[in-house]
Image (cartoon, helix red, strand yellow):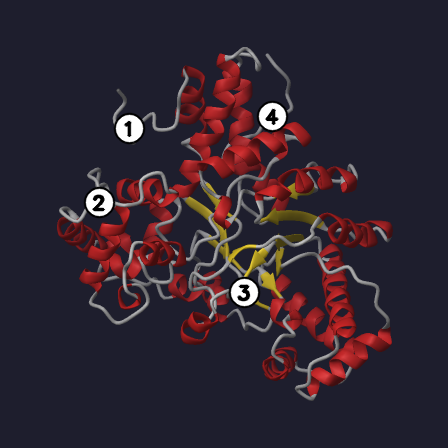
């Protein structure tokens, strides 16, 4: 019987073990979509105890704790940190087969060197050991990035952000790239017209221009886009229920803007027109400046009204939505492709029933200009666990080119989440190794290993063009030797 989480964890063939240990494991990390706070990197934040760094802001853990009957004061409330950690340990002990069980023990091993199980009986000892480790010089925010062999991260940043912390990191000469990602979602959030008007004021201040017309709004966004570009940004991100692809007229967009500036809600047709026009115009900006556009599709957010009013967004009350995806997405991408304005694009779906839809959609808009120009992003949020990753890789392999895949991103707010890259890499190597063992792929470990290295790091480096030096020279297309 195998030991829990040994060196060959998730690796079930000789080929899988060789691919992981010899090729995947040595690769550094490029985390091109995360929610780390750049201020914490700029100030090189330190944490006094594991509850602060491990539980703070992590709605994955909060959801599990609530499901385990843990009162809210131990999740987001004012309970003492040690007590919060004890409640988390109780939850982990009840989380067998949940991805949090694997992730948590990987993080204890890779970040803190602790190989024991987290249980109520071991909670205090692990808390004390982690607290002692966090006092070491290399356990600051920057130290953790170095320990995890990170080459670059791309954070997620509002379009009106002044990016002061990114600029400070750059000016400090920190060797790891911490780059912004342009996210204009608040411009398209029309549910609260008063909040929209307040945000428009922030955007005016950031752009240095008044927004009195729809054209002025687009000009302000373009000014912010140019500012982000000058700060090293090469990625945009849009979090949407579905692609916005309604027909629209200039008059509808102007009418919607006029109502919003008066803190009144546009009618349904005006809202659809406004969102579709903003998404189309920002996509054109991405194409002009050579960026990649990420579309995160399908989240149904803030389902629990009482808790949303109490805690705000991103606190663990979002879920998988069942919105129509194929037709509006095809229409949106086609509008851009028809005018030769389609940027490099990474699609993410949250509903697993859309897996084949996404993988097949990519092939409609590949144009031969860039290898893997249209990407199906890594399994995301509720899907970034073992089964979700395996299904994603299987479908991508069958309907696209696995060898061109840009690989894993954590989508995380925690500096301890980088072992998720290891989790992905082991799953990837096991799938390929299984096919070698079954005679479905040739037993050419060097050829397959270089493909694995490309997926782990090189493809994302080449696709995003962030100025990162090669880790190894990818040779996925050199052929079988």
Cα distance, mark 1 to mark 4? 29 Å
Residue 302, given in percent of the width and then of the height, sits at: 51, 66
Cα distance, mark 3 to mark 1? 38 Å
Inspect this view and state whether residue 258 appears: yes
Identify the mark nearer the N-term, 4 or 2.
Answer: 2
Residue 476, labelled with which disc?
Answer: 4
In this rendering, which labeled residue sits more in front, label 3 or label 1? 1
Identify the mark nearer the N-term, 3 or 1.
Answer: 1
Tag 4 near tag 3, CB within 8 Å: no
Q: SS class of the residue under badge 4?
A: loop
In this rendering, which labeled residue sits more in front, label 2 or label 1? 2
Rate crowding at label 1 as few (under 14), some (14 to 19) or many (20 or more) other CA atoms within 10 Å. few
Cα distance, mark 2 to mark 3? 34 Å
Q: Is residue 335 left or right of residue 345?
A: right
Tell me what residue is drawn at x 27 percent, y 22 percent.
2
Disc 3: which residue:
157
Tell me what residue is drawn at x 53 percent, y 43 percent.
379
Identify the mark nearer the N-term, 1 or 4.
Answer: 1
Identify the mark nearer the N-term, 4 or 3.
Answer: 3
In this rendering, which labeled residue sits more in front, label 4 or label 2? 2
Residue 400, given in percent of the width and then of the height, sits at: 68, 32
Tag 3 near tag 1, CB within 8 Å: no
Q: SS class of the residue under badge 1?
A: loop
Disc 1: which residue:
6
């Amino acid at each position: 019987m195998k030991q829990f989480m040994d060196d060959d964890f998730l690796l079930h063939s000789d080929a899988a073990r060789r691919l992981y240990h010899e090729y995947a494991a040595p690769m550094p990390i490029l985390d091109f979509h995360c929610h780390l706070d750049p201020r914490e990197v700029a100030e090189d934040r330190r944490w006094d105890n594991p509850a602060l760094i491990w539980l703070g802001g992590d709605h994955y853990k909060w959801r599990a704790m609530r499901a385990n009957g843990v009162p809210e004061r131990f999740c987001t409330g004012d309970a003492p940190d040690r007590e919060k950690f004890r409640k988390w340990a109780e939850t982990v002990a009840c989380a067998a087969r949940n991805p949090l069980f694997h992730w948590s023990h990987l993080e204890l091993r890779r970040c803190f060197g602790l190989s024991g199980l987290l249980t109520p009986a071991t909670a205090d000892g692990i808390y004390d050991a982690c607290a002692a480790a966090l006092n070491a010089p290399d356990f600051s925010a920057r130290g953790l990035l170095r320990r995890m062999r990170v080459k670059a991260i791309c954070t997620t940043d509002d379009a009106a952000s002044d990016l002061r912390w990114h600029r400070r990191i750059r000016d400090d000469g920190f060797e790891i790239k911490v780059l912004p990602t342009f996210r204009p979602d608040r411009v398209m959030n029309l549910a609260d017209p008063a909040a929209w008007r307040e945000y428009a004021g922030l955007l005016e201040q950031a752009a240095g221009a008044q927004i009195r017309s729809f054209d002025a709004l687009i000009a302000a966004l373009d000014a912010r886009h140019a500012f982000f570009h000058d700060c090293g940004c090469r990625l945009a991100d849009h979090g949407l229920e579905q692609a916005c692809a309604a027909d629209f007229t200039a008059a509808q967009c102007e009418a919607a803007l006029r109502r919003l500036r008066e803190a009144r809600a546009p009618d349904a047709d005006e809202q659809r027109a406004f969102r579709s026009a903003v998404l189309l115009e920002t996509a054109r900006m991405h194409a002009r400046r050579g960026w990649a556009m990420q579309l995160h599709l399908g989240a149904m957010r803030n389902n629990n009204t009482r808790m949303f009013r109490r805690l705000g967004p991103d606190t663990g009350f979002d879920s998988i939505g069942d919105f129509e995806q194929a037709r509006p997405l095809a229409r949106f991408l086609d509008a851009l492709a028809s005018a030769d304005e389609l940027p490099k694009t990474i699609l993410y779906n949250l509903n697993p029933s859309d897996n084949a839809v996404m993988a097949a959609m990519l092939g409609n808009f590949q144009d031969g200009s860039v290898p893997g120009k249209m990407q199906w992003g890594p399994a995301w949020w509720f899907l970034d666990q073992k089964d979700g990753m395996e299904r994603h890789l299987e479908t991508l392999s069958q309907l696209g080119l696995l060898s061109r895949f840009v690989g894993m991103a954590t989508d995380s707010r925690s500096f301890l989440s980088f072992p998720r890259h290891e989790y992905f890499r082991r799953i990837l190597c096991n799938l390929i190794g299984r096919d070698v063992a079954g005679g479905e792929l040739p037993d050419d470990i060097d050829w397959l290993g270089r493909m694995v290295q490309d997926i782990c790091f090189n493809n994302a480096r080449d696709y995003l063009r962030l100025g990162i030096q090669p880790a190894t020279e990818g040779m996925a297309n050199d052929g079988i030797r």
